[in-house]
Every structure is written in C-alpha cells, then in structure tokens.
Amino acid sequence: MPELPEIEVLRRSLTPVCSGRTIREVEVFEPRLREPIEPGFGDRLRDRSIETLSRRAKYLLAHLSGERTLVVHLGMSGRLEWSAEASPPGKHQHWRLQLDDASVLTYRDPRRFGLAEVIASGDLVCHRRFHHLGAEPLSEEFDGAYLRRRAHGRRRGIKEFLMDQTVVVGVGNIYASEALHRARVHPRRKVSRVSLATWTRIAEAVRETLNRAIDAGGSTLNDFRNGVGDSGYFQIEHAVYDRAGQLCPRCRGRIRKIVLGNRSTYYCPRCQR
DNA sequence: CCTTGAACCTGCGGGC
DNA sequence: TGCCCGCAGGTTCAAG
C-alpha cells in the first residue's frame, strides 16, 4: 500500500499518540512475514518507551529507550493502526503493542510482504536493510546533478531507474508514473539520454509529487488510512495512474498503459517525451 | 558490474 | 451465483 508519502503520513499521525509512551505488553499472533518475526521480538520491546518516530525510505522507525529501534515495513498491504483501547484480534493481525495508557498499536498485513524487527540503534546506518539505500528525495542531496551522476554509464529506462531504491528511496509504482508525468518525460526514455536540465526537472517533479501527496494526507491511495484511521481528503487525484483511456489533465491527450519491469505504467503519449 | 524476470502472499473485481 | 484469471502500493535473489 505504501510509498514514501503514506509512510510519512503514518509517522505524523502516530507521533502524537505514541511518542513518550511505554510498551507494556507485546503479542505476536502470526510471525510469518517477509522474514519471520524473531522469537525475542516481544522481549526486546517490552518496558521500553517510544521516544520518537522517524522514517527512512519506506521504513517506519520507532526509536526506543535503551538504544533500540523498532523497524517496520508495510510491504504491499501492511497497516499499522493505533486505537485507544484493545479489541479482539482480527484476521491477518501479526502483532500488537499495548502501551501504558491502555492504547494499542496493531500491525496487520494480509499479503505478508511486510517486516518488523528490533535492531540496535547504532546499526541503523550500516544495517543490511539500509546501507545500500539511495538518497532521500526530500533531502538537499537529491537534485538534478545527483541523478545525472547516478545514471552515468547506465542504460535503463527512467521509470525503473526512479524506482530503484539504491538510487532514490521512497518512489514506488504510483508516484513514479505521476512524477514522470509532472516532468513531461516518457517512462521508457533511457537514462543515458537525459540532459542535466531534464534531470533537474525530474528531481523537482519527484519532490513536488511526494510533497503534494503528503500534504493531502497520503490520500492518493484509495484505501489508505493513516495510523489513527483517517482516510485523507481525496484532494489530489492521480493525473495518470490507473487512468488508461482517460484524458490527460494537462494536454487532453489519451492516457496509455504499458508494462515496464513487470509493473503497470501510465503516461500521456502527447506531453511526455 | 548491470539488467531482467520471477518469486514471495492473499484478496478483489471482472468476465463468463 | 460461482469459478477462474489477472492484477495489486515492495523487496530480493538468481540467471543472463
């Protein structure tokens, strides 16, 4: 379900209800995820307090007392939901945390592509999950020159390049199509044939697309809920994603769907070159 | 090194 | 109504 904006919205929605709370109890109902939840999961969390929530790429990080960090990834279908009080465990719930004000944080993931683990906070930078990750798209580092440098000597298409988490993190299948539409670049264009000026336009489009989605509360995903159950406001519609056959909102061209790297890709053949 | 494609899962909607 | 197929927001690994 989640690309960078959804994780960021989740982080912001959970921060006021979770930060400063102590984890009183941990229940694991279904350990099978992308990697199984380790037997020591609960023991490493219990009695620690949640100091802050942050995000790296599409990972949500809960920084705990005692130099531990809870790492959560939602995969395709994961949800992390806070509620003021416990309710009976539902289908596909993998684990939940009971906090010291009797509220509960529940992780649910039907497709089980997600992940949850506790690591030493000092390992965050060099951990195998993180060390290969590319630039954060909302950081200073991410600009046209960075993209040009990373594309040097490569032959891929631009959309697969933007979705490569070792280049830039957080851009998934929806926002890759949306950002390329905003930048007026054809998703099949080879990265070897992009000028610095165009790289700069692409970097700006990625940043704008993600920021607008965050501002809209992650609402461009139609079944997205933040951590406290709000659905967003649907202020933003996709320009091209899942809109094959409809008209491009910019030039009235006819939006097309193709498959790139096994992923559905949408673009306007009239204004994207 | 790079690129590509498949595998990992369950649920849903469309077509018949 | 029910069955079958294709498709879905991500990551990782093997093969070429």
Image (spheres, coloured by chain):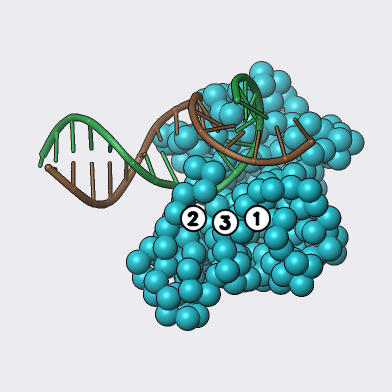
Chain colours: A cyan, B brown, C green
Q: What's the chain of the residue with tag 3?
A: A
Quarter of the picture containing the C terminus of chain A is bottom right
| Chain ID at mark 1 | A
Residue at image x 51%, y 39%? A108
Instruction: Tell me which residue sits at (75%, 67%) in the image.
Output: A195
Q: What distance separates the C-alpha of mark 1 from that of mark 3?
A: 6 Å
Count of numbered labels shown in the rendering: 3
> Could you say whether the residue bearing mark 1 is in a helix, strand or loop?
loop
Confirm whether circles 2 and 3 share one chain.
yes
* Tag 2 residue: A265
Q: In the rendered image, which residue does mark 1 sit on?
A: A190
In contact (CB < 8 Å): disc 1 and disc 3: yes
Residue A188: assigned label: 3
* Residue A245, horizontal then vertical, whole percent: 35, 66
CA gap, disc 2 and disc 1: 15 Å
- In the displayed structure, A118 sits above or below A74; it is above
Name the secondary structure under disc 3. loop
